[in-house]
Amino acid sequence: MAKPVLVAQALIGSLISLLFIVEPSVSSMFWLLSAMLVQLYLMMYMMLFAAALELRRSRPEVERPFRVPGGRWGIRLACGTGIAFSIAAFVVGFIPPAGLPESSVATHTLVLGCAIAFGALAPLAISRWSLSHQDA
């Protein structure tokens, strides 16, 4: 494994561990990390469903090993349902756990939102950076 990847993984793990400072208990921190991971996976699923819709629209002639019953309307229904439930679960993920002090609810939501934004934007920034260095 490449040394920079291991160093980056260690730095990110250490930064995530520092979040324990802002959370009042280990259980709320566990909830925060679990919610963050689920939110990132839900974002990936929303992109997956959107990609399926786009590929079926833009490249209908490509033979695929699996077809959704119902043709165009079937894939729209399946992907639309998947996106809708993913969005609903994403919204529910921002509800803090019961028993969290009122002062910590805002902090919990803010930290969760920032962590999700970082988790979603960091790969895009790394990709853009690596592409710009390939051209040089």
Image: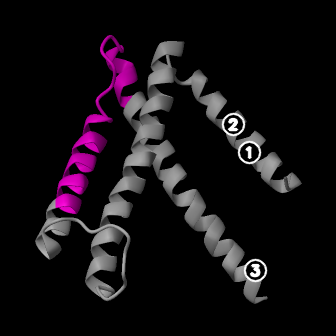
Inspect the magenta stretch and tell me whether residue 59 lies in it: no
Mark 3, Cα crowd under 10 Å, few <14 / some 14-19 / many 20+, is: few
How many numbered marks have been drawn onto this rendered protein structure? 3
Residue at x-position 54% and y-position 14%: 26
Q: Main secondary structure of the magenta part?
A: helix
Residue at x-position 52% and y-position 59%: 121
Q: On the image, numbered disc 2 is attached to which residue?
A: 13
Nearer to the camera, 85 or 21? 85
Q: Quarter-wise, where is residue 132 in the image?
A: bottom right
Amino acid at pointer 1: Gln
Residue at x-position 22% and y-position 47%: 85
Residue 83 visible to an observer of this rendering: yes
Q: Looking at the image, tell me whether mark 3 or mark 2 is earlier in sequence order.
A: 2
Amino acid at pointer 2: Gly
Q: Position of residue 74 (x, y in %)?
A: 14, 66
Residue 41 is left or right of residue 69, and the answer is right
Residue 82 is left or right of residue 70, and the answer is right
The region drawn magenta spans 78-106
Q: Position of residue 115 (x, y in %)?
A: 50, 43
- For the residues marked 3 and 2, what is the alpha-carbon distance in whole angstroms? 26 Å
Assess whether mark 2 and mark 1 are in contact (beta carbons under 8 angstroms): yes
Amino acid at pointer 3: His
Q: Secondary structure at mark 3?
A: helix
Q: Is residue 134 above or below residue 96?
A: below
Nearer to the camera, 82 or 20? 82
Mark 1, Cα crowd under 10 Å, few <14 / some 14-19 / many 20+, is: few
Check the image and tell me how it is coloured: one colour
Q: On the image, numbered disc 3 is attached to which residue?
A: 133
Residue 25 visible to an observer of this rendering: no
Inspect the magenta stretch and tell me whether residue 92 lies in it: yes
Q: Quarter-wise, where is residue 108 in the image?
A: top left
Q: Position of residue 43 (x, y in %)?
A: 39, 53
